[in-house]
Image (cartoon, grey):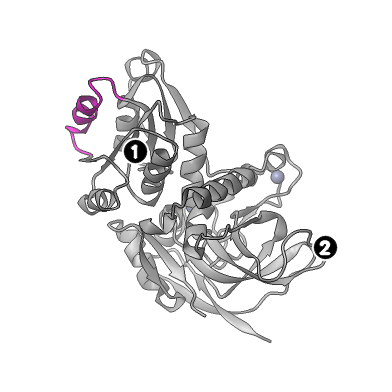
Amino acid sequence: MATMTGVILPGNSTVEFKELPVPEPSGGQVLLRMRASSICGSDIRAIYREHLGTGPEAYQGVIAGHEPCGQVVKVGHGCKRFVEGDRVVVYHISGCGVCEDCKHGYMISCTGPQRAAYGWQRDGGHAAYLLAEENTLVGLPEGMTYVDGALCACGFGTAWEALTRMAVSGADRLLVTGLGPVGLAAAMLGRALGATTIIGTDIVPERLALAEKLDLVDHALPADDDALAKVKHLTAGAGCEASIDCSGAAGGRLLALQGTRQWGRCAFVGEGGTVEFDVSPVLIHQQITLYGSWVTSLKHLEDLLERMARWGLHPEITCTHRLPLAQAAEAYRLADEGQCGKVCIVFED
Ligand SMILES: [Zn+2]
Ligand SMILES: [Zn+2]
């Protein structure tokens, strides 16, 4: 029987390799040859360092990697759209397909017991092959690379969902708190949607420097005690019409809210932790609309990929490290350090 090496995350900041059989697709499934499988902040926060999650975030010892992109090499019976050779991005949650959220394409918030996320409850992308449900696939448009596709599967999809839910446009200036991979995605997409000024903040100097080097932000500010005053100064005292917290840190969330203009919109996508603020002056009296936004829908992932291709934008510019599967330990160490851009495991021919 053919076997492959998969990466397992035992939850003590190490990586394990396991030999497993190459799976066979059954009805409605396809076998993908993996081409790119990037590492998400959630992999670090909830799996790599320790297994924190419960419910949809419970890691069940499967092959890790929930940002998979690859090529169809085998099709199970009953597949309706994809054929051998197709380049595809995997929407990383397989839902029951019949609950209210699945019907809207938000398999991320599927409430059925069958819900299983790739890399969490079913095998993910850190192996040469991935068994995927056909209904979780989105075609990778021509002109986009496999690394582009992997980055859209979770991170760019998450940024896109929040920005479009806030209807970010050329009428807006955008504040991005936290310039990790999702923050860089928000900055790139905010600009593409027309936002005229992009202000980014982070506590890590390397991340500020990267955002500037990639020309994704107009202003990169250290997230220190002066940050709010600087945001206000850059916006003639008003604050930004839209803001998005990608830091997942209390300070970043508060800065996003306080840096939002009166009547503006603010979205939280950075996961974990808490936040505390004086509700009346910070939120109510400012007439701010606050969004919580979790990943994206199948359709919105497809929308994102189509537009990225049309705009000629490449998420992969935010990927600072590409490593082969055999160097997965180094890849996770780099991602955990939090001083670089996106880290992606890539598969050569
Ligand atoms: Zn993710
Ligand atoms: Zn469902």
Label 2: which secondary element: loop
Residue type at mark 2? Gly
Q: Residue beneath label 2, please?
A: 78
Span highlighted in magenta in the image: 223-239
Residue positioned 19% across, 37% down in the render: 224
Q: Say whether residue 233 is magenta.
A: yes
Q: How many C-alpha atoms fall within 10 Å of the one at disc 2: few (<14), some, or many (≥20)? A: few
Give the residue at the far bottom of this rendering.
1
Which quadrant, please, contains the N terminus?
bottom right
Quarter where residue 77 is shown: bottom right
Report the side of 89 relative to 250 (left or right). Answer: right
Is there any visible trace of residue 183 in the rendered image?
Answer: yes
Sequence order check: which comes first, mark 2 or mark 1?
2
Residue 242, x across and y down, in percent: 39, 29
Report the side of 11 relative to 35 (left or right). Answer: left
Residue 318, x across and y down, in percent: 37, 56
In depth, the one of 189 and 31 nearer the eye is 189
Q: Say whether residue 317 is magenta.
A: no
In depth, the one of 137 and 326 nearer the eye is 137
In this rendering, the answer to whether 13 lies above or below 304 is below
Give the residue at the far right of this rendering.
78
Label 1: which secondary element: strand
Residue type at mark 1? Val
Residue 255, x across and y down, in percent: 29, 31
Report the side of 72 relative to 63 (left or right). Answer: right
Q: How many marks?
A: 2
Residue positioned 37% across, 42% down in the render: 187
Residue positioned 42% across, 72% down in the render: 328
Q: Residue beneath label 1, please?
A: 176
Give the residue at the far top of this rendering.
285
